Amino acid sequence: MKGLKGDIRIISYFLKLVNTILPSYIPLIVIAAFFKAIAPFINIVMPKFILDELMGQQRIHIFALLVGGVVIGNGVFNLINSFFATKVDIANSKLVNGFELHLGRHIMSMDFESLENPKILNLKDRALFPITNQGVLWRMIGGFINLLQIILTLIGLVALISTINVGLVGIIIGIVLINSFIFKRLQALQFKFNQELIPLNRGFSYYASLASDFSMGKDVRIYNMPPYILSKIDEFNEKSLDGFKKVFGMQGKYEGISNINLQFQMIIVYTYMVWKVFKGAISVGDFAMYISATNNFSTQVSQLLTQFIEIRQMCRYLDLYLQFEALPIKVQKGSKEIGVLSSVNIEFKNVWFKYPQAEDYTLKDVSLTLNSGEKMSIVGQNGAGKTTFIKLLCRLYEPERGEILINGVNVKEYAFDDYTKLLSVVFQDYKLFSFTIQENMSFNQACNQEELEIALQKSGVRDKVASLDKGVETSLYKNFDKEGTELSGGEMQKLAIARAIYKNAPIVVLDEPTAALDPYAEYEIYAKFNELVKNKTAIYISHRLSSCRFCDKIAVFDNGRLIEQGTHTELKEQDGKYAQMWKAQAQYYV
Ligand SMILES: Nc1ncnc2c1ncn2[C@@H]1O[C@H](COP(=O)(O)OP(=O)(O)OP(=O)(O)O)[C@@H](O)[C@H]1O
């Protein structure tokens, strides 16, 4: 009963969701189900009158009238039903699209750290795979339409069969119940198999994508990976094939048993009806009508239970989705509005941070202050924690201990969307998207062409963009537009810098912004750095220590700790880690 209660909760959640996405949907399916439910009665009841007329007075005009009635009745109902079927099909597509939007919105609002937590990823796959690949939502909705129609038809059939013998209704229900029990076992088996299939599918999709993903094409060829990839795909195929063999075998067995039960039911019904005709209790027309009604009743009851079990089975999948949707969102809480800030001071206070699955702390007791308008350079060896520091500032993760403050307020208190407006960031692994250059810069906001030109000019990519046939309207990559362009790594990096400049946020973060740039472009960025970031608060991460000289402050990270802070001259005089790194680099650059 607890399970049924849970399922009712799930069903009502989805019905509410359906109603929010498409309010006309539920009234539409109720009307469609009503017409579908009445249609079969023409073919159950009318043949009785035709047969009785044939066996009795054989009046041609009455016979013609009855046959005409059947033909016209069927024609009209067919038209009405196909009209509604088309309407329902269109509405179904709208609904599924609406649900996908709902889903996308939810996934994009999840904590960034959730996207690398294997437990959450697994739940996400188990919840979304059935919805996107097995049409669970669609089947649930279809199930509802059928259930409604079946219930309406059954009410009519019970009324009709009861006029000869209510006991028949009981016998048929009994046999159908046995068959439903068998069906339920089969569904449970399929659910178990589908859940086992998900990790296999994930592996399969990954290896299949390696074979077709353009961005992997170079490595796949150079390292002669095809035999390895194909053997992996084969391995996943073998495993899933074994599972399919087992499920299909069981399915065959269960279907066989159900069929025997149905034949048994036919023998009982036919024997009873023939006996009634021999006794003269019913006419041949009645015989045909009751046989048709009982056959229909049996089919409808069995479909009712099948639908019921199917809907409950769908609830198992949708329950996974609800668990996924109910995952708490940690980072994005906070409601404080930021408004327009005249100055932005950043403070890290004894911040400790450990990645979700990691054993050791990546940031250890980091405390630093960056006053409004100051420019700070962060240096340190690979893996020292520089990018992690930025990720925490961006609120992609939360510190485990300590606080991050902007103008004295813990960043957690700010509304996340508002907070992101403070930051222009070029990540080390920045991404540009398969949109036009202009869309990549402004993302659906009305684009200010003048500012866009300035941003492209400052990052040094304006001439390149101007040389493209469609200028800023050129698509990046060729996924959607065959006239799209593939820019070089350095040109892409300049576009990413332009995007950050165009955003014009009060905090600018550049994480290794010149890694892909040629020495001239790199020099340009350094020379124009102050002009690029103007009076903004800026953080600059680079392994080129010469770039630190134009910053007000340098922070040196080592193994997660902030070990030195000061200006270039101060740190050189301190003769610590920074001075060591400076000397090491000077050997090669001077
Ligand atoms: N998502 C993650 N999950 C677990 N550990 C991570 C994750 N991202 C980074 N790390 C680990 O945290 C440490 C610091 O990484 P971080 O990227 O902050 O270093 P970095 O100083 O920016 O290095 P680099 O100079 O190479 O860019 C590394 O040891 C890295 O392996």
Image: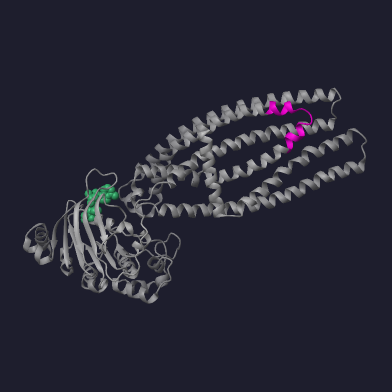
**Residue farthest bottom in this picture:** 450
User: Would you place residue 450 above or below residue 66 in this image?
Assistant: below
186 to the left or right of 46 = left
Is residue 394 visible in the rendered image? The answer is no
For the residue pair 223 and 465, the one nearer the viewer reads as 465
Q: Is residue 408 magenta?
A: no
Quarter occupied by residue 350: bottom left
Q: In x, y percent, where is residue 304?
A: 63, 36
How far from the left and from the top, in percent, is residue 229? 36, 43
In the foreground, 348 or 102: 348
Whole-percent x, y for residue 436 in the image: 42, 66
The C terminus lies in quadrant: bottom left
In the image, residue 529 sits, relative to residue 235, either above or below, namely below
Above or below, 397 relative to 156: below
Image location of residue 78, percent across then percent down: 73, 48
Q: Nearer the viewer, residue 36 or 111?
A: 111
Magenta segment range? 156-172
Residue ID at (32%, 72%): 455
Whether residue 427 is visible: yes
Scheme by which the image is coloured: one colour
Taking 5 as reference, is 354 left or right?
Answer: left
**Residue visible at 36% across and 71% down in the picture:** 465
Q: Would residue 12 be found to the left or right of residue 362 on screen?
A: right
Toward which corner of the image does residue 577 lie, by quadrant?
bottom left
| Magenta portion: prevailing SS class | helix
Front residue of 184/406: it is 406
Q: Quadrant of residue 579?
A: bottom left
